[in-house]
Image (cartoon, rainbow, N blue to C red):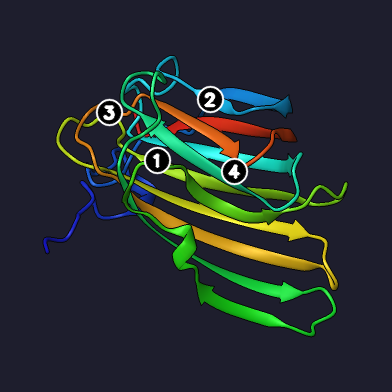
Amino acid sequence: MALVKHNNNSLTNLTALPSAIPTGKMTLLNTATASSSANITFNNTYINGDYLIYKFDFISIHAATENAHFSFNVSIDNGSNFNVAKTTTFFRAGHAENGAESYLNYRADGDLAQGTGDQRISEFSNIDNDSSTSGSMLLFNPNSSVFVKHFIADTSLVYNATPNYNEHNFTAGYANTTSDVDAIIFKMSSGNIDAGQIKLYGLGS
């Protein structure tokens, strides 16, 4: 692999960045706030090819239904259908509040193998007032007409049980399409999103 070299010898004299270093800044495109909402959807008003990477921040997502999973799906027809085939993986790490139990395991029931259904990005939501999910997800180059569309999600879930737990969920995969992915939907596997925010950012224009 060739080395990337700056156009001069000292960082103090640096006047330009080499092409391998991305430029631009993270730009807030939209903030959506749930209030007993069936879903939160972003369409081609925002996912329109202006950016190479789209970042979604999940802030205190609270479910209206016990034991619902926080999930997403994507569309290639601006939200008329959310049914793109996806291949994914899902694993988790957890720790009890009282220290009595900890675990790290793969969840086969959380992945898809060319499935068109919703993809879980956080699990076991509770309706207790102090339980919620926060985290983020990256969607890479969704408007490419050449490549499939990769994503990586990382969430932290607090839920009340006996004892209470924190769970760290890791999800990754790809939407197996070279068509333009121009809309995304976030929702619970059952019931509404009772409260919370999703912030959408664009990176790498």
* Residue 25 drawn at (x, y percent): 45, 33
- Decide: marks 4, 1 in contact (CB < 8 A)? no
Image quarter hosting the C terminus = top left
Q: Of tags 4 and 3, which is closer to the observer? A: 4
Within 10 Å of the Cα at label 3, are there few (<14), some (14-19), or many (20+) other Cα atoms?
Answer: many
Figure disc tally: 4
Quadrant for residue 85, please give it. Answer: top left
Secondary element under disc 2, as helix, strand or loop, is: strand
Residue found 50% across the figure and 23% down from its top: 42
Give the alpha-carbon distance from disc 1 to disc 3, as whole Å: 10 Å
Q: Which amino acid does the dot numbered 4 rest on?
A: Ser
Q: Which amino acid does the dot numbered 2 rest on?
A: Thr
**Mark 4 or mark 3: whose residue is earlier in sequence:** 3
In the image, is 45 to the left or to the right of 17?
right
Residue underneath mark 3: 143
Residue underneath mark 1: 139
Quadrant for residue 199, please give it. Answer: top right
Residue found 38% across the figure and 24% down from its top: 81
Give the alpha-carbon distance from disc 4 to disc 2, as whole Å: 15 Å
* Residue 96 drawn at (x, y percent): 77, 75
* Residue 77 drawn at (x, y percent): 32, 19
**Mark 4 or mark 1: whose residue is earlier in sequence:** 1
Give the alpha-carbon distance from disc 4 to disc 1, as whole Å: 21 Å
Secondary element under disc 3, as helix, strand or loop, is: loop
Residue underneath mark 4: 189
In the image, is 75 to the left or to the right of 107?
left
Residue found 75% across the figure and 49% down from its top: 66
